[in-house]
Amino acid sequence: MSDLKQSAFNQFSNLSARLNLDSGDAWQVHDQALVMKKAGDDVVMLSIGDPDFRTPEPIVDNAISHMRVGRTHYSPALGELNLRRAVADYESRISPLACSENEVSIYPGVTSAIYSVMSCLLNAGDEVLIVDPLYVGYTPILTALDLKVSVVLASPEYQFEPQLNDFKSAITDDTKVVFINTPGNPTGAIIPLETLQALASYCLEKGIWLVCDEVYSMFTYEKPHISLRTAAKQLENVVVIDGLSKSHAMSGWRIGWVVAPAELTQHLGRFSAMSIFGCPQFIQDAAAFALNNDEYYVREMCAQYQTRRDLVCARLSQMPGVKYLKPESGMFIMVDISPIYKDDKEFAQKLLNAEKLSVLPGSAFGTGTTGHIRLSLVQPENILTEGCNRLERFLQACLSDQ
Ligand SMILES: Cc1ncc(COP(=O)(O)O)c(C=O)c1O
């Protein structure tokens, strides 16, 4: 082949170039830990974000029975009506404003739902306002779409809850979308009703879309989840995204949904028709079954996460020099190690080297959690206890080196 032709195969789109990001050091320690574990090392992995529970058995059985009766064909781009109705019923149960299936569309997971919504709302160069700290998976989506990103900082001083006045100061005439996440990853913070309500009204007044990722909605401890749809007085500019990956331990099934005004839902349907072209029927059937029937299992898993959270928090409260906020939701605990060690990435690396404990550095999630480490609760209690033993030993060693 000529050099000229060959060089054509080294050239890719601008989108490919943008996505070829350096993911920084976020996953460096986690990736090393996986290699060590594979090689037989006794590594404790507290850096994982995938539920360790199995998908509840009745959901699995439901999917299998639907496969057996031939629910294995193409599905409408917006999703199967039975699931869209189940989502609309669920949303109507948790919000004073009724939801109809015309406002619901189905996706293979929340990630795909977010990408679809942003694609239908924004052009390259448009401004989106996000909250720092944020879920690491958002950055590639915003980058892929070539958006201008501005940031509201949610600091530990306010339990990582973003403040209304900070949103108001960060919103400009160019802001097209405000993108929030409650309950939040990585901090578990729940945005209070008053903030959501006032933010929704402010955005409506300014002609700005308010998009909320609520993938941890069924995953709250002492406080109930407050959906943006519950808080907002009007829904013209409100988009809620949710799914079953976390609450139902169904991350690999890939099921998420968007609840949005009917006109936007029609655009989303056209977007899906040329991109995902529908989700598997038997998975949608099982997801509808899950939403209609399985609150017991969700409560059971949530209670176990809560027990794990309490166990780890009780241990952290005995450890020297660190601070933490007891998360209100989700499966992570952010631990402030800055009084003991300045650089969170270096801390995570040394912790892995010294104690074979894998955690994520907080700086991976933004400025708000820099100086922290993220401990994940998706391990059984004996592993969490062992992880805490190792962390405590390492902290003591750091202190005695000072
Ligand atoms: C806040 C948040 N949104 C979205 C996702 C991805 O969800 P899904 O697996 O349904 O794409 C995650 C996964 O960790 C998350 O934490």
Image (cartoon, grey):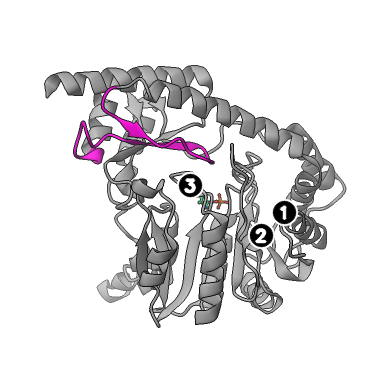
- For the C terminus, the quadrant is top left
> Mark 2 vs mark 1: which is more N-terminal?
1
| Residue on which disc 3 sits | 189
Nearer to the camera, 375 or 34: 375
As shown in the figure, which amino acid type bears the numbered disc 2?
Thr
Residue 153, picture quadrant:
bottom left
Outermost right residue: 69
Cα separation, mark 3 vs mark 1, equals 19 Å
Identify the secondary structure beneath mark 1: helix
Question: Is 17 positioned to the left or the right of 268 in the image?
Answer: left
Along the polypeptide, which appears first: circle 3 or circle 2? 3
292 w.r.t. 266: above or below: above
Whether residue 158 sits left or right of residue 263 in the image: it is left
Does residue 17 appear in this view? yes
Residue on which disc 2 sits: 230
Instruction: Point out residue 227 in the picture as x, y percentages from the top left corner.
Output: 62, 56
Disc marking residue 94: 1
Q: Which of 246 and 73 lies nearest the eye of the viewer? A: 246
Q: Is residue 77 visible?
A: no
- Label 3: which secondary element: loop
* Between 10 and 395, the one nearer to me in the picture: 395
Name which residue type carries label 3.
Ala
Where in the figure is residue 88, as x and y percent of width and height?
76, 60
Mark 2, other Cα within 10 Å: few <14 / some 14–19 / many ≥20: many
Residue 113 falls within the magenta-colored stretch: no
Which residue is depicted at the point 73% across and 50% down? Answer: 283
Residue visible at 29% across and 52% down?
Answer: 367
Range of residues picked out in magenta: 320-345
In this view of the protein, which residue sits in the foreground, 90 or 339? 339
Q: Is residue 10 rendered to the left or right of residue 119?
A: left
Residue 373, quarter of the rendered image: top left
